Image (tube, rainbow, N blue to C red):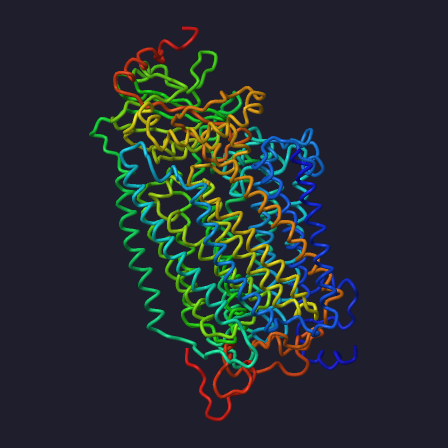
Amino acid sequence: MSAHADTHAHDDHGHHHKETFVTKYIFSQDHKMIAKQYLITGTIMGVIGVLMSIMFRMQIAWPEEPNVLFEALLGKWAPEGVMDADIYLALVTIHGTIMVFFVLTAGLSGTFSNLLIPLQIGARDMASGFLNMVSYWLFFLSSVVMIISLFVEAGPAAAGWTIYPPLSALPMAQGGSGMGMTLWLVSMAIFIASSLLGSLNYIVTVINLRTKGMSMTRLPLTIWAFFVTAIIGVVSFPVLLSAALLLIMDRSFGTSFFLSDIFIQGEVLHYQGGSPVLFEHLFWFLGHPEVYIVLLPALGITSEIIATNSRKPIFGYRAMVMSILAIAFLSTIVWGHHMFISGMNPFLGSVFTFTTLLIAIPSAVKAFNYITTLWKGNLQMNPAMLFSIGLVSTFITGGLTGIILGDSALDINVHDTYFVVAHFHLVMGISALYGMFAGIYHWFPKMFGRMLNKNLGYLHFWVTAICAYGVFFPMHFIGMAGLPRRYYTNSNFPLFDDTANANVVITIFAIVGGIFQLVFLWNFFYSIFYGKRTVQNPWRSNTLEWTAPIEHMHGNWPGEIPHVHRWAYDYSKPGHDEDFVPQNVPLYDGEEELQH
Amino acid sequence: MTAFLTIIIVIFIAVAIWQMVKIFDLAQVGASNDQVATDKDNKINGYLMMGFLVFIYAITIASFWYLGDLPLMSNSASEHGPQLDNLMIISMVIIFIVQTFTQFLLHYFAYKYKGEKGRKALFYADNNTLEAIWTFIPVIVLAGLIIYGLFTWTSIMNIDESEDPLVVELYAQQFNWKARYAGDDNVLGMANVRLIDNDRANILGLDESDPNAQDDVITTELHLPVGRPVLFKMRSQDVLHSAYMPHFRAQMNCVPGMITQFGFTPTVTTADMRKNPDIIEKVENINAIRTKNRKEIEAKGTQEVIYEFDYLLLCNKICGKSHYNMQMKIIVETQEEYDAWIKEQKTFKNSLTNN
């Protein structure tokens, strides 16, 4: 295209003048294409993860009954259609791994950090397009390895997504701890490399490549969230990598980092002096910040979408930034609340209770600031807005029970019950998923130049919202009855027979909710090709990405990069005719910029 | 049957989606050419937001109605139980107040301020007083909860050994539990998995030369005398397990290579608990369900149809294939009953074979 030719002069990122199919769609170094690659890979992994959850939910609701779905999908793991106990644990494990890492870390952060960081700060691309490409392809590779691990003879990893040794370290303890676990560890090691490359790129880009006038206090909250998320990732992911490497050493080279005094299947193993508790510390040193790696981008996206669709400035911009920073800092010193009853010193439990409950404060600030942003707004109920409001709702519902789980004394009794499952699915799983959906509905026009069908979006949201509560709200109560998680069937405990009906209801909600994601998938893939064409700024938004042309181009803007003269939230500002003032519009004579 | 039902549901929903997609497609003919919310969309979704608020309240009430006996919050059977339940109830009440209030604000605002063409939103970017309010209220409430929680935690986890607690080892392995009583000397003999000798029936790896080990008693049922503090020392021989005793509000992981501990005082005997009206009601309810499923339970043949209440020790840390069936019965009884029972058990010295 000749129109693109003059923009090439501005492109100083090693742009290939002649784009082939391979450089444009496969080994692309363009952040917008990489974002789409992340999104589509994440979506595919998400379909697998959700399908797994529906299968094990069916097993919980109708334990040990034959099911054609199992027979069709699980093969030898479901003799005569009855799910095997080993594969149940494997499904739970891989569901957790896929959803936490592949969907909500790479799929969410990878997609929107890549898409939005350069576009919203006014940069032509990421600091290093090449590293960005490598980051995506490592993620792809790790996804492939994870999927291959599902087809291992002895079964995929089945020690829970937290892979605590010795269960994960000893092939004789569990079929899935053989080759399946090896591949799991390899996949995660590659994934972490990918995540680190991505995060370093985001940090460098935000620090160095902001356009003229884009001071840190004028950054949209999305960018703040992505930036801080990347920092948490760089701080904590390497610790998981070292834990994984030490575990590989224990498994394959006979070291004793995490193992000691083990007698299994009639023989004493040589391990001496290690401790599984050490692994728990290393795992959760990533594992807890990981919750916020998943959640903060969703909160950032929500901040942006709620402000835009409320036609109001986000309430308390400075408090929002401070609370992101506070959450990020606190998230790295609370990991012990996963380990109150692990056998560590009870005094540590006291310390971690204290730091954990502190996190409720910035979280409460964020929730109230969202609600106040709605107050006296002019709410445009686009699907993205619905998902954002839904996020605030599940964030509150799920977050509140954190007060119980973060309290070491109360945790004694609800630890590892369904209460925990309900809590973290609402506060991080569903909330982050809503954030991801909100982002997709909002930035789909930016990504593909077309619009998603809004009516299908409404249908998708309302059914998902009802099903999410239908699944996870009653689950708290089952947990309060003392029902442990990760049980293949509860039928060996007559004590829990009175929760069986509730489990059926939950499973039906899960199935319906899962099936209605097809509405989204159809809308998504159909609209990529046949959706209505979009206008340049469909949501009448202030941020810079909407000043870029609809047709994607290398370097993002033809001609000069826009300069920034104001913050991102001048919605309905008095003195302006329109109810939005894009960031690149200069202040008129005598106009005051908000001090924040 | 289930499979059939599932397929039918899947097909019905697929058809429903297909139909709806068609409706939406038809509805779009001649509609405005963009996919941005109109005033009508705002209105409909605004009302739906209020509907959703009602749904949240309804599911809360329904959950309480059907699942509200909350055995983890009432009828605890240990001395520290009521204290912990109290903290739980206070936390729950706070949570429900905040939940009801904030969900109302969120959804009501979403309904009240639904967009209309031509209306301008209020430009309202900041208010330090408001933000101070919702920073300090959580600070105060949480400070209270933290202090209360820490006192409770400390009092539970600090085991006062001067009270002469009964020392019992809980020993975990894939996939069962054993209990080891310390015997007349109330001191557990030394043990290590390296000393396990199945040929001599030394299954827990006790040091045969340790005098303290001789009178130890190994059992597959946990009997506890009511009113006497018990100190559990926990070991695992293979992978992580967790000794979860929900009725006693007790849980601790069993970790290979180290000894963990937890202590409590049982306060209600099994016999008394079976007479508790709440428990009677719960058991009746469960038995009604079980009678309905009589056929399936009998076909399996592993359980009695009629359930009788018992305290349980469950494994609550994923430990492998049969994790879901790793349990041990706990019986709390009077000191006399306990003494009679323990006297019947073989001591370690006498249980060894090939002597």
Q: Residue at x 44, y 27 (%)?
A: B172
What x and y, as percent, mark residue B73?
35, 40
Is A111 rendered above or below residue B227? below
* Viewer can see residue A223: no
Q: Left or right: where does residue A111 sit relative to residue B260?
A: right
In front of the other: B14 or B126: B14
Q: Nearer the viewer, residue A89 or B171?
A: A89
Q: Pick the quarter of the image with the C terminus of chain A.
A: bottom left
Badge count: 0
> Which quadrant of the figure contains the N terminus of chain A?
bottom right
Quarter of image, res A59: top right
Observer-nearest of B331 and B308: B308
User: Which residue is drawn at the image coordinates 36% and 9% (left, top)?
Assistant: B350
Residue B284 percent coordinates (x, y)? 43, 29
Q: Residue furthest top?
A: B355
- Residue A547 at least partly seen: yes
Q: In the shown orientation, is residue A353 left or right of residue A563?
A: left
Farthest residue toward the bottom? A589
Q: Position of residue A314 (x, y in %)?
A: 47, 72
- Which of the 4 image quarters holds residue B43? bottom right
Q: Residue furthest left?
A: B162
Instruction: Name above or below for residue A322 compared with residue A173.
Output: below
Front-lying residue, A379 or B346: A379
